[in-house]
Each structure stands twice: as structure tokens, then as C-alpha cells.
Image (cartoon, rainbow, N blue to C red):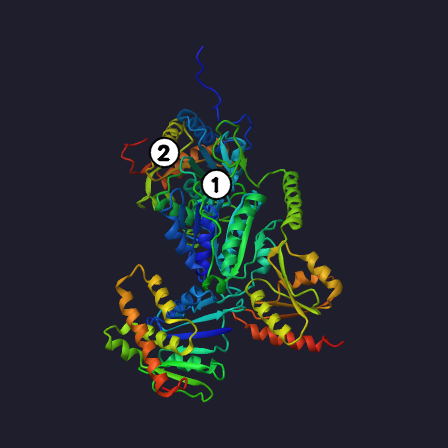
């Protein structure tokens, strides 16, 4: 009988430590499936961040190296310049990429570094206990915006993908959500396209994935998935934000 | 033997290249040598200066708190550096641009109309080399030959400048020689 | 050649493949030298990074890939690099960092100073780690120490700091290069270059199991003990019959040596002990000297940082005086000579 579904080859047999309903485990699965399908496992290097996914190397069965908080893009740059044959990706949360690592991601994108960023946006600092992130929505309650994010005091949700899209070094950016089967399929295509962009040497590629964080949002997993679809996507519209690869729409 | 020299002038007068040429020549003659430029904001525009130390022995410090010689190319440098000169030291000054303000009585003076001579050769920017030629003749710290060879090495990527610089170095050297013959007292012309 | 360019050429000849820098005075000539000489060199990488923070993290990335990687800066920029240096130390990755130090604290001055001694020798960033610190005293030594720094970094798998200063960086002196740049750039064995023909690996410092972090600290500590035994380096000058010993490092040691020579000419029995490695520090040799010599003078271009190591080494066996000029003021050799003479006679030395 033909096997139609199984564990991706490069996802280790380690139970995930992520909370029920969290998007990280789905995203890990998507990336490892694509690595397997593209047969690039021997030359992939992953750079996980400080954050909930700090232990991503417990799950990814490819070479990985920790980065300081926010510095993933700089670490990936140094690595790729030293060893251009590698396929290098960073895995970063919204605090990591859009707050402390803003300078690094902008300049890495602007130099057109041939690396791929996987940007997991859950609108909150997960690991440290649910503080406000740059991507937190207006009126959204967090432990450091207990009365809801007030844009007059805390500014507006930061749209990094739209910000860096005009930079000439950027080849491909797409925003997806991992909260529906269709969204997961689209995400997988985008991940593949991002890796292909890198391998073809076209420049910087980024996939922003809207991802639920039920525990810190104080919702059930189902509610959090609905919140992504119904609320978050209004602030962060899904789709291709930039495609300068000359290869058409990935989605 | 340990000799320390401060060169000073406007940025753009070629003050650093005077020091560098002398340092190169001293190195070619097998001496220990250090070259220390002033750096930072003051090199862009304002005054520039550098210190050269030449010695048969190891050089303890590239800094000269009381140099044996100072070479000043403009009035502000005279004001700033004349009081640092070692008592009994020699001050070379660009008499084309410095007319007054020399207050020390315990030092020897060598006036070199470097800017005028350079202009008469059709290359106002070579005043530094005229001065360096005169300095070399008076002090004998290095030979004119090594100085010219060193200059040619430094400027090998800009061959156009070699001839004029050589002319200027020689003119300064000859001027100092004539004056020395005329009075035979260091620093009296 | 100026000290900054000399560090660059020394690095290239040591097989440095990746350089990442950021402008700051007085080390700009080093970044410029690497831009001119590495950006088009086959297989090499040069980036002017967006910050010192990015530059040191690029070094971390290039070191992961097994290449010889370097960055350089001056004091305020070194403060920014400390995060990355801590990660390099914790991840047991080699790297070379050149500090052409200047006066602080804060933006301070751009003139030469030695006030980064504590930062360099105590790790500098967070966590329990050390870096090997080499302190050149001439442009020639900048060349030699930069080369040595790459070898030490690879040997001990840790960051190595070359601690010079603005004067050494800016001054020109004749130099000789004893090595040609290697034809094939060295790649460290066991570098993280993809899970090809072996199981996948990861490099990290973070773990939820504190005993693993404790093990890492113990393993680093044992390595540091070996380094103290094997790599401590110093220069001793005229110490055999000395009644007073001056302790100084880097450019200050060079000035002090001139002062000691002049004091000897005056008949004063003075010697110089110059730590060449600031970490590991030559505690033992200074301690042994303290059994015989009862007067020490520490001279630094700071308010006294190495002073504390000299005091630790001597364990109250001898009297320690200090002379320092902080903030970027450059003392002169004759100034140090005067201090030596004054102290020598104040302490009643030279009387039989």
C-alpha cells in the first residue's frame, strides 16, 4: 500500500515542547517537508533565534546554530559569505526580527544577501510570557499593554514585510497564515519558492507566517486560529508582497 | 643618536608627506624610525602635524614633547609649536607665510621661502619638498640621494609628480647649501 | 606601514577569509585596508556592516562555517561587540578581534588610551568566560600578534583579542612579514558545513538543563587553566639586579623601557616587566620577582587597571606604586623617567 502521510525525514522524533495550538510545530513540519522534497538537507544551515523556537534544533534534523536575540540575519550573512554553497535560513519571531533585529534584517535585505528569512508573526513575545511586540495589534491586550495597545502611546503595528519590500536587494516576500489547510499549503509553496530564490542567487527572500499563540492570547486553540483568520489578517493582509524572481506568483 | 622632528602646517600643505618621506629615507638608511600623524577632526581642514623619530637604538616613544627640530609651514603652527622646541633646537620656518611672531631667543632659526620658491618653479604645492630639501641639507639626518629615491618609490603610482618633487627637493637643498657657504653659521639665513 | 594596515596585512597573511567592520576612529585605516585588499580577493569576504553588533555576529556566522574571521573596532565599538564575544566564547568558536583603543568612558576621546584593560581581560560580556588578550607594543608586533591570534583562536577554540591603541594604530614603522598569504585558505576541521555523510549537529549555548551549562562552564574553566599554563607571555628587561621594577604593557611599556634605559644611565637599578599576554596574566613571574624586589611601579594610560593584577600577583609581598595618564593624554618617556627617579629616591633605594 502506498504511504500517503508520515513524519518528514528531517523532523526528529522528539515530541514538541510547544503549547497546544501553537503554530511553530506546523511551521517546523512545513520547512522540513520542503527540505526533504528539495533534497537540500546536506547543505542547509538553520539559524534559530532567542524566543519560543530557541530549541528548534531539537526538531530540525539539519545543521543549526544558535543566534543572539535579533542577530540571525547578521549571523546568516557571515555564514553565507564564508560558505556560499550553503542554503541558509533564519527562523525568527516578531520580537526578534521586528524589534531588536530590525537593523540587521533591513541591511541584510538591502545588501540582497542570498539567505531566506522565516518570520513567525504571532503579535506577541511568547517565550518571555506574552509582552507587547512591535506587531501587536491596536487595542490588543498583553502583559505590557494591559489596557490594550494604545497607538498614541505605543505606536502602531509594524509591518516589516511591507517596509523592506521596496529595497532593491529583496527578491521575494510573501505573507501567509498557518491556520487553515489552504493557508498551510500556500505556506509550503512560499517556503519552497523562498529557498529556490536563494539557490538561484536572486537575493533576499522572506516568508512572514501569521501564527497563533493561544496561551498568551488567552484563547482556546480554536479561538486563536479564528482570530488569525478574522482579525490579524485585516492588519496583515495575506499574499505576495514582492516577487522580483521573474518566476510568477508562488501562491 | 635619537632625533625627533615635528612637521606642522595647513592641511593640504603636504605636511604629512614631508614627514613620511623623511621617515622612508631614514628607514632606507637602516635606522629605526617612527612616524606619528595627528589624526581625527584636525586633519580635515585646519592644521596638520606629524612627528618623526629617527634613532640607531629602539625608539621608546613616537611622541616628541620637546623635539630637536620643528618645521612650521604657516603662522598658526609657529604659534602652536615654537615653545615645544628643545632649547638649542632648530626651527625651520616657511618665511613666505611667516613674517612675525618668533619669540624664542634660545633656538636657531632657518628661514626658507618655500612657498615663493615653489611658485617660481610653477608648482605651489611643492613648497613642502623645498622645505624638506633645506631641512636635509642643514641637519644631515639622511642623504639627499636616499630622500629622492624614497620619494620616487612613494610616488611610483604618480610618475608625473616625480620630476617636480625632485626639482623642489634639490632647490631647497641647494639654497641651504649656498646660504651655509655664505655665512657658515647654522640657522642664520 | 601604519599599525592599522599592518593588522590587516597580518590577518590576510594568516589566512583570514572574512572581515566585517564598522567605521570608528582611530581604527578606520584597518577597515579601509581590508576593503581594498579583501573585497576582491578570491574566496574572501568583506562587509562594512550596519553596526559593530552586526559585524561581530557576522564573524560568528563566518566562524561557524570554519573560516578564519576577524573584526576590529575601538573602545565604544568594543562595548557593542561584547554580546557577540560572549556567544563566541560560549559556542567555543574562534575569532580575532582587534581593539585600537581610545579614551573613555562614553564617547571619550579619539586619542590613545589603555582603559579597556578590564573589559578585555575579564571577558567583557556576560557569563563566565575569558578571552586571550595580546598587547603589542610596536607595529611589527601588531603584525606578529595578529597572526598569533588566529593560531591561538583555532588552537583553543575561543575569541582572541589584540589590544592595541590609537597611537599604535596610527603610527608608521618599518615592518617585516614572515609569512606569505596561504594559497588555500584554511577551513577548520569539524566546522558546521551541512549534515553531509554524518548526522546533523547544532551549536548553541542555550539549554533548559542547567547541568549542561554547568558542564560547559567547567570545560571552559579547565581549558582556561591550561591556557594559563601554556600561553602566558612576558618580556623582562634588566630585572636581574633591579631594586625597583616597572610593570607596563603595550605602548606604555615601550615608553617605560626608554625611561628604564635612561634611569640605568643615571645608575638607578631599575627593570621592566612587560606582560605580552594580558590574559593569561604573568602572575607567577611577578610574584617570584616580588620575593626579591620590594618596590614596583605600575605605569598605565588609565587610572590603574592592570595595577590590580600586579597587586594580586604580589600578594602584599612588595610595595606597589602607580603612575597613570587617563583619557587619551599621551605621557612621554621622560615623564616616566622622572617618576621612576623620584620614587626610587623617595623609597631610599640605591643606598648601600
- Residue C299 lies in quadrant: bottom right
Task: Identify residue for label 2.
Answer: A199
Residue B103 lies, in percent from the top left, at 43, 88
Residue C134 lies, in percent from the top left, at 56, 55
Relative placement, left or right, of B42 versus C223 is left
For residue C77, above or below residue A90 = below
SS at mark 1? loop
For residue B176, above or below residue C153 = below
Relative placement, left or right, of A111 versus A64 is left
Which residue is at the front of the view, A54 or C338?
Answer: C338
Instruction: Give the residue at x 39% y 35%.
Output: A230
- Residue C5 lies in quadrant: bottom left
Per the rendering, the mark at residue A215 is none
Relative placement, left or right, of B179 versus C7 is left
Residue C197 lies, in percent from the top left, at 50, 26
Relative placement, left or right, of C39 versus C270 is left
Chain letter of disc 2 in the image? A
On the question of residue A140 being in view, the answer is no
Pointer 2 with pointer 1, Cβ within 8 A: no
Task: Identify residue for label 1.
Answer: C186
For residue C109, above or below residue A166 = below
Spatial separation of the CA atoms under disc 2 and disc 1: 25 Å
Chain letter of disc 1 in the image? C
Instruction: Give the residue at x 64% y 72%.
Output: C264
Amino acid at each position: 500500500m502506498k504511504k500517503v502521510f508520515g513524519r518528514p525525514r528531517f523532523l526528529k522524533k522528539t515530541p514538541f515542547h510547544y503549547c497546544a495550538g501553537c503554530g511553530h510545530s506546523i511551521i517546523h513540519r512545513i520547512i522540513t517537508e520542503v527540505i526533504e522534497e528539495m533534497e537540500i538537507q546536506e547543505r542547509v544551515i538553520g539559524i534559530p533565534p532567542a524566543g519560543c523556537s530557541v530549541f528548534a534544533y531539537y526538531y530540525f534534523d539539519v545543521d543549526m546554530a544558535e543566534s543572539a536575540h535579533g542577530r540571525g540575519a547578521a549571523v546568516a550573512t557571515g555564514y553565507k559569505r564564508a560558505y556560499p554553497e550553503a542554503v541558509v535560513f533564519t527562523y525568527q519571531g516578531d520580537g526578534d526580527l521586528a524589534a531588536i533585529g530590525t537593523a540587521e534584517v533591513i541591511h541584510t535585505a538591502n545588501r540582497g544577501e542570498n539567505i531566506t528569512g522565516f518570520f513567525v508573526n504571532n503579535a506577541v513575545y511568547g517565550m518571555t510570557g506574552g509582552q507587547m511586540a512591535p506587531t501587536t495589534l491596536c487595542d490588543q491586550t498583553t502583559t505590557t499593554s494591559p489596557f490594550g495597545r494604545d497607538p498614541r502611546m505605543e505606536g502602531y503595528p509594524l509591518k516589516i514585510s511591507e517596509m523592506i519590500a521596496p529595497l532593491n536587494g529583496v527578491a521575494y516576500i510573501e505573507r501567509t497564515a498557518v491556520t487553515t489547510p489552504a493557508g498551510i499549503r500556500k505556506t509550503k509553496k512560499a517556503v519552497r519558492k523562498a529557498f529556490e530564490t536563494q539557490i538561484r542567487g536572486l537575493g533576499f527572500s522572506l516568508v512572514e507566517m501569521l501564527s497563533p499563540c493561544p496561551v498568551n492570547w488567552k484563547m482556546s486553540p480554536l479561538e486563536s486560529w479564528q482570530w488569525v483568520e478574522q482579525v490579524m489578517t485585516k492588519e496583515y493582509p495575506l499574499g505576495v508582497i514582492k516577487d522580483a524572481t521573474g518566476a510568477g506568483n508562488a501562491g | 643618536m635619537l632625533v625627533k622632528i615635528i612637521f606642522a602646517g595647513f592641511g593640504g600643505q603636504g605636511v604629512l608627506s614631508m614627514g613620511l618621506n623623511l621617515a622612508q629615507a631614514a628607514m632606507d638608511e637602516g635606522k629605526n624610525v617612527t612616524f606619528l600623524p595627528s589624526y581625527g577632526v584636525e586633519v580635515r581642514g585646519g592644521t596638520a602635524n606629524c612627528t618623526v623619530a629617527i634613532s640607531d637604538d629602539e625608539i621608546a616613544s613616537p611622541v616628541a614633547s620637546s623635539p630637536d627640530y620643528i618645521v612650521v609651514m604657516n603662522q598658526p603652527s609657529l604659534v602652536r609649536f615654537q615653545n615645544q622646541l628643545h632649547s638649542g633646537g632648530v626651527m625651520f620656518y616657511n618665511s613666505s607665510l611667516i613674517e612675525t611672531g618668533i619669540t624664542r631667543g634660545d633656538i636657531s632659526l632657518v628661514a626658507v621661502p618655500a612657498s615663493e620658491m615653489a611658485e617660481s618653479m610653477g608648482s605651489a604645492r611643492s613648497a613642502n619638498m623645498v622645505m624638506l630639501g633645506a631641512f636635509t641639507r642643514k641637519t644631515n639626518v639622511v642623504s639627499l640621494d636616499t630622500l629622492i629615491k624614497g620619494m620616487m618609490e612613494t610616488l611610483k603610482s604618480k610618475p608625473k609628480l616625480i620630476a617636480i618633487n625632485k626639482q623642489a627637493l634639490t632647490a631647497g637643498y641647494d639654497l641651504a647649501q649656498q646660504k651655509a657657504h655664505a655665512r657658515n653659521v647654522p640657522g642664520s639665513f | 606601514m601604519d599599525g592599522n594596515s599592518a593588522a590587516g596585512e597580518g590577518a590576510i597573511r594568516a589566512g583570514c577569509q572574512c572581515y566585517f567592520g564598522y567605521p570608528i576612529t582611530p581604527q578606520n585605516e584597518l577597515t579601509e585596508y581590508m576593503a581594498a585588499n579583501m573585497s576582491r580577493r578570491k574566496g574572501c569576504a568583506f562587509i562594512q556592516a550596519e553596526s559593530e553588533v552586526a559585524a561581530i555576529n557576522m564573524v560568528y556566522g563566518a566562524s561557524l562555517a570554519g573560516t578564519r574571521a576577524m573584526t576590529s573596532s575601538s573602545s565604544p565599538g568594543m562595548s557593542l561587540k561584547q554580546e557577540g564575544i560572549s556567544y563566541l566564547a560560549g559556542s567555543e568558536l574562534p575569532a580575532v578581534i582587534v581593539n585600537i583603543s581610545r579614551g573613555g568612558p562614553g564617547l571619550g576621546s579619539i586619542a590613545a588610551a589603555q582603559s579597556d584593560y578590564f573589559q578585555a581581560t575579564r571577558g567583557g560580556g556576560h557569563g563566565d568566560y575569558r578571552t586571550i588578550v595580546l598587547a603589542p607594543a610596536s607595529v611589527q608586533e601588531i603584525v606578529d600578534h595578529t597572526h598569533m591570534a588566529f593560531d591561538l583562536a583555532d588552537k583553543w577554540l575561543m575569541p582572541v583579542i589584540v589590544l592595541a591603541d590609537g597611537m599604535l594604530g596610527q603610527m608608521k614603522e618599518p615592518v617585516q612579514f614572515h609569512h606569505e598569504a596561504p594559497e588555500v585558505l584554511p577551513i577548520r576541521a569539524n566546522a558546521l558545513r551541512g549534515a553531509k555523510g554524518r548526522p546533523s549537529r547544532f551549536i548553541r549555548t542555550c539549554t533548559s538543563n542547567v547541568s549542561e551549562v554547568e558542564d560547559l562552564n567547567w570545560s571552559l574553566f579547565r581549558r582556561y587553566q591550561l591556557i594559563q599554563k601554556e600561553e602566558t607571555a612576558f618580556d623582562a628587561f634588566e630585572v636581574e639586579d633591579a631594586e625597583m621594577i616597572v610593570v607596563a604593557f603595550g605602548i606604555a611599556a615601550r615608553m617605560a623601557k626608554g625611561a628604564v634605559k635612561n634611569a640605568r644611565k643615571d645608575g638607578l637599578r631599575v627593570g621592566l616587566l612587560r606582560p605580552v599576554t594580558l590574559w593569561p596574566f604573568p602572575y607567577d613571574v611577578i610574584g617570584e620577582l616580588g620575593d626579591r624586589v620590594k618596590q614596583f611601579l605600575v605605569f598605565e594610560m588609565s587610572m590603574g587597571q592592570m595595577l590590580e593584577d600586579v597587586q594580586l600577583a604580589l600578594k602584599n609581598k612588595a610595595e606597589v606604586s602607580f603612575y597613570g595618564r587617563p583619557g587619551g593624554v599621551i605621557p612621554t618617556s621622560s615623564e616616566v623617567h622622572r617618576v621612576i627617579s623620584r620614587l626610587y629616591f623617595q623609597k631610599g633605594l640605591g643606598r648601600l
